[in-house]
Structure formats: C-alpha cells, structure tokens
Image: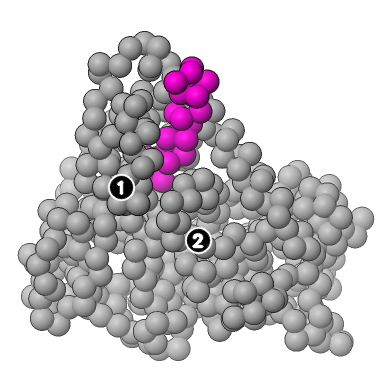
C-alpha cells in the first residue's frame, strides 16, 4: 500500500468514526455537571435536562439547532442496566422522542405520528441486555451503550412555554433497578462526580476537529468496544485494521510513519466533510438540497459524517424533512448584503401533518443574533398572507419595514443558509413531488 493510499484510507476511517467521536465529545460537554442544570442545558448521564425555552444565538453545543420545539435532552449509558422512560399525555400537541445510537442512527422513535397522544412506559436497553422487558414495559433496543435521546415538543412561542414545561417534567428516566411502577418514587442524584478537567464550554465540533490522528483514533478504538460497529461494517473494518483501527486496539506499537499517516487523515477530515457537503448540495431542486435517508444511514458513512457535522440529531424522513438552501434561484450564494423573498402560492405552503418553519443559520451552522431574537419563522408565527392567499417571507439583514416585519426572518450581514423544516411531512414531500419554491433575490 502506497503512502497516498494509506492516507486516503486514514481519512476514510476518520469519516467512518466521526459520529462515534462526536457522540463522545458532545456527551462530555453536555454532562459535565454534578446535577441537572436547565439554564446551561446540561445534566449528568442518564438524566434529562429540560430546555425551558427555545435556544438563542449563544447555543453552540449542537450544530443546526431548531427554534420550533422545546427540547429535553439526555445522554444515556446503558452499559450497566436499562432505563425506564415515562411520558405524559400530550393531548393534541405534536411530540416525538427519538433515540440516537452512538453512530447517529435513530434506533427507536415514539411520538405523535406512531403513538397518538401518549405511550409507554418503555424500557431502553443496550447491547448487553438480553432479558425480556418486565411486565408493563415496552422494549426499545439500542445496538450501542451510549445513546442520545432528544424529546421535542411543539410550541407556539413564549406564552406556550409553561404548558410545555409541564410536559417536560413528565418526561422522565429511571434506572430499571429503581423502577417501582411509579415515576414519582425516584429522585435523580444531585452530586454526580464530574471528571477532572472536564471542558463544558468548547463546542464539541471544535474539540473533535482539534484532535490529532493519534488522539482521534485512540478514542474511536476505545468507543467501539461498548458501541460495536454494525455487522455490515465488517469489510470496512478489515481495511481499517491495517492502520491499527479496531475495537479495543492500541496505537502504542505503531511507527512514527504510521502515526503520521493517521495525523494526516485527521487533518484532511474537516476539509473532506466540507467537500462532501458541497457535492451533496450540488444536486438541487429550485435551489434546495433535500437530504433524504437521514437517521438510517446503513453503510453510507460519508452521508452519516456530513449530517453529524452539519445537522447532528437529524430525524427519520417520516418524522421530519430538512430542505436546505445555500443559494438563491440563480445559484448565487446567500448573503446578508442582499434581500430575498420566499414566495408560496395560495395553497402551496409545505404539506405537513405536524408543522413547518424556515430557520436561519450562519456560516458555522448556529443561530444568528438579531434585534427580534427571531431564529425561525413558520406556520405558527402569525404570518400575514397577501390578498390572493399567497405568502411572502422576507429574508434579509435589515428590517423590511413595520408592515412586513411579521414575515421577516433576520439574516446576518454576511454568508448564511436556511433550513425549511417539515415535521411529519405528507407523501408528496417525501417522494419529491412537492419541493419548496426558490429564494428570489430582490436587490
């Protein structure tokens, strides 16, 4: 094998392991507290934190967040025992509780689409659990010990938050050994040890990209022990083993030249992700790239890595679609130096059973600070329609004026991109028979 081919293989292995390493770093940042801290959006492992309001521009823990739902969030460690998940009655509100395994696949999801107003209780079990679920519990099986669950509750804005907060309080996790049948019998611990030197500030994506090849692949090898690769990955693992990359393997015996190859693979990783995203988004329909097949990637490791980088926590298509625009109708990059309008003809707004929104992102895939503290706009935003029933959304840096401000999505001064989120999309959106209209530059 030539040096060039070894470096190419190292970059391929970097992409392969990207979701697992990202999971480790994100878990470390979001669990670096001794007790639940909703204000900082953190909680110890196996405990929920409840985000009592939608994120703002200071939120950098997860790329491409949304402002449509209130989140709860918990990082799970199922290596010792399963957890019981209990849920309240959500009434007619849209809700969903996806569970992502450590490889970023949605291994289980419950919600309005599948379960109606409520469901459960559930037993969430990892690969070490082989027993049947106790009576009264429905089993949700994960192939990995580390998991991230991100309940979402639709909200119409701040006036609705207190009602959603009560639903969050009814979304609970209890270790199976503590389960009595009544979730009120369990109180999560408040003095959980925090690892020395834990970094609860640096965004996880920055931490991942700062790792040398030796650091990155050492962590990957360790994580693959309790979070085993899928059986279909075996042919790829056979190739990666030539570089010392395998579950539980040590890199201590590698030569300086071999370690240099791993460093070069890690160095090229982030730029490869950007190139893959650009390639994926080059296939557009009216300026929108629709990434299908999210949350269930099989052996498409490139797509899996790209979505982990630019949309970590993505749902299955049946629950949500995320058309993404980086250019206008003429293929020109979106930039706050210009103004844009997104026009929907009467009766042609996004077809959904849940809800839809348009979300603004800066070039780092975070929210954009603005005078309205408005990060998304959609069908719950009291939009004004035109006399003919059509709808215009104004996407620009400066206010379009008082009479249009209700339909204004503020943009930064420079480069930006937008997501059109469709929750519980209708079949025409799933098949591509319906696609969003293009963003038209108006100045």
Q: In the rendered structure, does residue 18 fall within the stretch colored magenta?
A: yes
- Residue 343, by quadrant, is bottom right
User: Residue 190, image x and y in percent?
Assistant: 19, 54
Q: Residues within 10 Å of mark 2 (few under 14, many from 20)?
A: many
Dot 1 corresponds to which residue?
229
State which tag comes first along the sequence, 2 or 1: 1
**Alpha carbon distance from label 2 to label 1:** 18 Å
Residue 41, above or below 70: above
Residue occupying the point 86% across, 55% down:
330
Residue occupying the point 47% across, 65% down:
315
In this view of the protein, which residue sits in the foreground, 225 or 97?
225
Residue 295 visible in rendering: yes
How many numbered tags mark residues here?
2
Judged left or right of residue 169, residue 161 is right
Judged left or right of residue 374, residue 262 is left
Element class at badge 1: loop
User: Residue 232, image x and y in percent?
Assistant: 35, 52
Element class at badge 2: loop
Q: How is the image coloured?
A: one colour
Q: Residues within 10 Å of mark 1 (few under 14, many from 20)?
A: many
User: Residue 14, image x and y in percent?
Assistant: 44, 34
Q: In the rendered structure, does residue 53 fall within the stretch colored magenta?
A: no
The span shown in magenta is 1-22
Residue 52 visible in rendering: no
User: Residue 320, image x and y in percent?
Assistant: 53, 70
Magenta stretch: dominant secondary structure: helix
Dot 2 corresponds to which residue?
294
User: Could you tell me which quadrant the C terminus lies in?
Assistant: bottom right
In this view of the protein, which residue sits in the foreground, 224 or 23?
224
């Amino acid at each position: 094998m030539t040096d060039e081919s070894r470096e190419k293989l190292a970059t391929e292995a970097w992409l392969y392991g990207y979701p697992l390493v990202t999971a480790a770093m994100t878990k470390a940042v979001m669990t670096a507290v001794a007790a639940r801290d909703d204000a900082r959006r953190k909680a110890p492992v196996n405990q929920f934190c409840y985000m009592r309001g939608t994120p703002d521009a200071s939120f950098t823990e997860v790329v491409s967040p949304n402002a449509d739902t209130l989140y709860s969030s918990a990082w799970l460690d199922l290596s010792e025992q399963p957890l019981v998940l209990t849920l309240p009655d959500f009434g007619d509100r849209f809700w969903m509780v996806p569970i992502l395994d450590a490889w970023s696949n949605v291994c289980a999801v419950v919600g309005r689409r599948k379960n109606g107003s409520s469901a459960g209780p559930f037993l969430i079990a990892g690969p070490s659990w082989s027993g049947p679920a106790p009576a009264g519990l429905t089993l949700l099986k994960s192939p990995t010990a580390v998991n991230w669950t991100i309940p979402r509750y639709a909200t119409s804005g701040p006036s609705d938050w207190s009602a959603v907060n009560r639903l969050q309080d009814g979304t609970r996790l209890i270790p199976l050994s503590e389960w009595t049948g009544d979730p009120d019998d369990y109180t999560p611990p408040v003095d959980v040890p925090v690892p020395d030197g834990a970094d609860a500030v640096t965004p996880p994506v920055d931490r991942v990209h700062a790792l040398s090849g030796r650091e990155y692949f050492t962590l990957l090898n360790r994580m693959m022990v309790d979070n085993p690769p899928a059986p279909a990955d075996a042919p790829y693992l056979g190739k990666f083993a030539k570089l010392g990359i395998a579950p539980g393997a040590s890199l201590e015996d590698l030569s300086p030249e071999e370690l240099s190859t791993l460093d070069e693979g890690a160095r090229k990783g982030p730029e490869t992700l950007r190139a893959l995203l650009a390639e994926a988004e080059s296939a557009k329909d009216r300026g929108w790239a629709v990434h299908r097949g999210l949350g269930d990637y099989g052996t498409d490791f490139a797509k899996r890595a790209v979505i982990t980088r630019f949309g970590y926590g993505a749902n299955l298509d049946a629950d949500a679609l995320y058309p993404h625009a980086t250019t206008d109708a003429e293929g020109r990059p979106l930039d706050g130096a210009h103004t844009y309008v997104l026009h929907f003809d009467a009766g042609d707004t996004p077809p959904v059973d849940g809800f839809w929104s348009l979300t603004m992102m800066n070039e780092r895939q975070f929210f954009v600070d603005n005078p309205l503290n408005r990060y998304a706009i959609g069908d719950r935003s009291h939009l004004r329609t035109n006399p003919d029933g059509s709808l215009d959304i104004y996407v620009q840096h400066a206010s379009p004026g008082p009479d249009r401000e209700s339909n204004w999505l503020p943009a930064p001064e420079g480069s930006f991109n937008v997501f059109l989120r469709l929750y519980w999309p209708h079949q025409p959106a799933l098949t591509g028979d319906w696609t969003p209209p293009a963003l038209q530059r108006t100045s």
